[in-house]
Image (cartoon, rainbow, N blue to C red):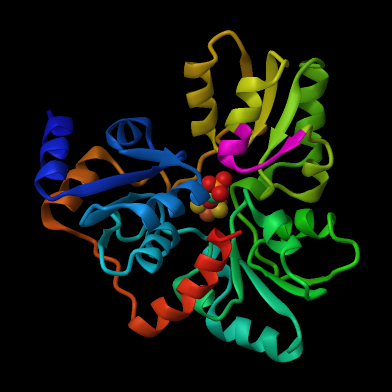
Amino acid sequence: MIIDDIKRLKQEKNAVILAHYYQNMDVCSVADYVGDSFELSKKAAETKADIIVFCGVRFMAESAKILSPYKKVLLPVKDAGCPMADMIDVSNLRALKAVYPRASVVCYVNSSAEVKAESDICCTSSNALRVVESLVNDEIIFIPDKHLGRYVAAHFPDKHFVFIDGYCPIHAQVTARDIKHLKARHPDAAVAVHPECPAEVVALADYVGSTTGIISYATLSEHNEIIIGTEQSIITRLNLSCPEKKFYPAVSDFICPDMKKTTLEELYNSLETESYEIKLSDEIIEKASGCMTKMLSI
Ligand code: 13P
Ligand code: SF4
């Protein structure tokens, strides 16, 4: 019944519901679009709806606001955040820029609006390589994810990269030992991981990519068994879409607690009371939108 109420409210208010793949399945079932960070950013930029309800974490809803500043953007759970995005703030970034004044700043989309406003170009896990390739500068400050940064840097030996100690606490827990252990038990299994995993894990992978990339790889791969190095929701999805294949989580409890905070009740309340509205100053939106639209144009 709550699902019918959500659909009714959505229609009455001309709202669109965007949900990240890591959201609870029931929330995804009422969403208009489910995708990875890049796909959802594009949907947010293109939508004709008056209200965007972003079922995800704060940086995603902020990104939607930056790309669609005249729309009302709602985050159903006020404190749904990303610990990695909180690992750098504007003052840390300004200090880093003062040390490397010549460097271009590439910020992962998992960052605050204020940090994006201080950066030259944004990237997601699906386009980070293309974004860095587009830069003529050979000195790059890559923030906040040191693991994604190192994965990218390995493809550009002629460029000099500067990182901070930022990481995703969920993906960073996977070790090479975990993968080797699973490979010993399932020798025919391929390994697909998110680039937020540490370099030693990425080195053992057959495929490295965003959540959408991992889903496509696992679906189309000739392998019938795949070790999955990203959030558990992806395995839940793959089990439904490819019941003939076997998927093994790289670690048990591979769950992003912030992504799981949104429930159908929170989503309903958000639509009904139009909360929690993302508010950003015009100055931040203007500066951050340069950084994001540059990414989208690549
Ligand atoms: P994607 O860019 O693959 O959606 O990943 C976002 C994220 O937060 C992964 O932890
Ligand atoms: Fe942030 Fe990691 Fe959760 Fe993604 S999985 S939202 S990077 S904490």
Percent of width and height locating residue 120: 61, 76
Q: Is residue 184 magenta?
A: no
* Above/below status of 289 relative to 206: below
Q: Residue at x 74, y 35 (%)?
A: 207
Percent of width and height locating residue 285: 40, 76
Placement of the N terminus among the 4 image quadrants: top left
Please indicate whether residue 131 sits to the left or right of residue 263 in the image.
right
Please indicate whether residue 121 sits to the left or right of residue 39 in the image.
right
Placement of the C terminus among the 4 image quadrants: bottom right
Q: Residue at x 39, y 49 (%)?
A: 43
User: Can the viewer see residue 108 in this picture?
Assistant: no
Q: Residue at x 70, y 32 (%)?
A: 192
Q: Residue at x 72, y 16 (%)?
A: 223
Percent of width and height locating residue 257: 45, 46
Please indicate whether residue 212 sits to the left or right of residue 289 in the image.
right
User: Which of the two residues, 101 or 14, is positioned nearer the viewer here?
Assistant: 14
Q: Which residues are magenta?
A: 207-214
User: Which of the two residues, 224 or 126, is positioned nearer the viewer here?
Assistant: 126
User: Can the viewer see residue 272 in this picture?
Assistant: yes
Using the rendered view, name the quadrant where residue 124 is placed: bottom right
